Image: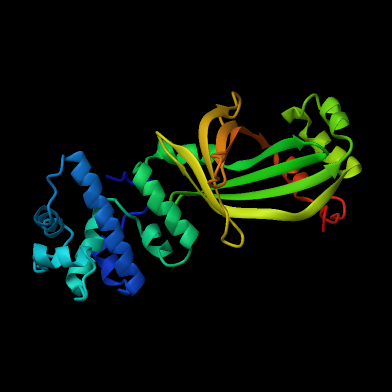
Amino acid sequence: MKGELVGEPAVDNQQFVLGLPLTGTLVDFLRAELLTYRAVMRRKDFGTWTDSTLTDAILGCPAVPDDWQFGDETLRRFLKNSAQPPGEQMLRAVAIFLLEKKWITRGDIGAHDKDPVLRAGIALQSFFTSDRKPKTLDFHKELGGTYIRYGVLPGRFVRTVLRISAHADPPVLRVSQRENVFRTSAAERILQETLGLRPQLFRKIENLLRSHAQEVGTTRYAFGFAVAGPTIVSAFLKNELGGEAVAYLVDAIGFGESDGLAGEFNAVRYAGWSSDGKTSEPTFRMQRVPEDVAELAGQVSAAPAEEEGS
């Protein structure tokens, strides 16, 4: 069961729900949330949650008016998305029930038809962790920030920037990825002068890239969300054209001793299947950087060069 979202002002959920327009997207949203709620309760209570049990729980909710009545067969048809349209009282009862159980918030309802990335993040966050307690929200804030990784290839430098931002309501972590490739003949010099790309010398790396490297091709962007809770931290992104998907599965996070914020994380990055099975990049280490370094990395580098072979 989802925990209470701290800081949400008290509200009469019945009055709030009575003022909602029952749009098609809201009906679909309520159906998906109720199905997930039932699945979680069945797992928790060893499969004892039937349609009848769920109907009784909804109608027995103190905030649901006593004169609102419907049967478990009506609820079953709703959950199966049958052709017969659901009744207004039942839909509003479902919404009140989910709000009273703190399974969803008003923020969830407000976001349900606005942003598909946000809705996907809410759904996956709810699946993996139902905890909305202050500790989880604080964890989200601690993860927020800009992270950079530099990779060295023969004659090339690759800069990957991840930006993580925390939203309290709904509790979702937005993630964006920006990747640039640089052509350079000074890779060894950059490695030597930055002591093997040490995080403390990231400013120097950026300055050396500007003087000894040339950006190749175009910047590649990807956008998505992260799931972060007691048992899992992962990020899921798609490129700006909706094509290639990227997933980060985090296996270690380092926190700063002074501010308690995440300083780095190690992850395996997956970018699709291939016939030889090489679908991931092992030990993908991302280092948190101050905002001035993030701004420096976001500035335009040397004029883009033509792609080799084009």
Q: Quadrant of the N terminus?
A: top left
Identify the residue at horizontal 44%, vertical 49% (top origin).
Answer: 171
Identify the residue at horizontal 31%, vertical 71% (top origin).
Answer: 20
**For this view, does 65 lie left or right of residue 306?**
left
- In-front residue for pair 110/233: 233
From this viewpoint, is residue 70 visible?
A: yes
Q: Position of residue 116 (x, y in %)?
A: 47, 62
Q: Position of residue 45 (x, y in %)?
A: 16, 40
**For this view, does 276 lie left or right of residue 310?**
left
From this viewpoint, is residue 263 visible?
A: no
- In-front residue for pair 209/181: 181
- The residue positioned farthest toward the right in the image shown: 211
**For this view, does 232 lie left or right of residue 66?**
right
Number of labelled discs? 0
**Corner quadrant of residue 137:** top left
- In-front residue for pair 190/264: 190
Q: Position of residue 310 (x, y in %)?
A: 82, 59
Identify the residue at horizontal 12%, vertical 68% (top origin).
Answer: 68
In the image, is residue 225 above or below residue 65? above
**For this view, does 171 lie left or right of residue 222?**
left
Its colouring scheme is: rainbow
Q: Position of residue 115 (x, y in %)?
A: 48, 63
Identify the residue at horizontal 27%, vertical 62% (top origin).
Answer: 31
